[in-house]
Amino acid sequence: MGIRKNDERCFIDTHHTKLLFSLECISTGPRKEIFFEDKTRNHNKVLVEVFRTDASFCHLFVLIKTRGKHDPIKREIPRFFDYIDTSEYGPLYGNLALQVEDVEWVALLCDPRTVPTPYPGPPSPAPIDACEGFLKITKTFCICCEED
């Protein structure tokens, strides 16, 4: 995983986490929450798996920020009951998996942009729905240390 000096010893390890999420879908705007942050400078490869379990009309996105890139990778996670066919990724049924190098953070965004309003009038700030499911992250990284 990169170039190392002769006096360094390196090891590779893997961390796993599985997180439940429930993000309120509020008519006043999207709600973003960071679920994973890597504050190290170690090279990593991260497998991000998002499993959506709700039937909400809200849109759920995964955002993955990588080192050296200004804008995060953004992918929509369809409702569990929806079928989305894209030529690049194939059919999706409420889940998505992406493997990305040098991840800084992973966030989920619940966006109410096309949620039907229950009554005419100005939007209510009260929660109207939620994006729910679980997020599984597998991070493989390399650490090199100078020999004593």
Image (cartoon, helix red, strand yellow):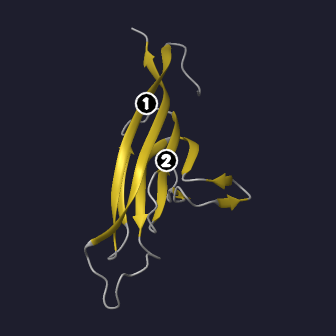
Depth check, front residue: 95 or 89: 95
Residue lying farthest to the top in this orientation = 148
Q: Is residue 65 above or below residue 121?
A: above
- Residue type, mark 2 in image: Phe
Q: Residue at x 39, y 82 (%)?
A: 117
**x and y, in percent, of residue 90 in the image:** 70, 53
> For the residues marked 1 and 2, what is the alpha-carbon distance in whole angstroms?
16 Å
Residue 79 rendering spot, x and y as whole percentages: 51, 59
- Residue 99 image-quadrant placement: top right
Residue extending farthest bottom: 121
Q: Is residue 114 left or right of residue 33?
A: right
Which image quadrant: the N terminus?
A: top right
- Marks 1 and 2, the one that precedes in the sequence: 1
Residue nearest the viewer, comparing 146 with 135: 135
Marks 1 and 2 in Cβ contact (< 8 Å): no
Read off the residue under disc 2.
51
User: Taking 113 as reference, is 108 above or below it?
Assistant: above
Q: Which residue is mark 1?
A: 16
User: Image height check: is 132 above or below 37?
Assistant: below
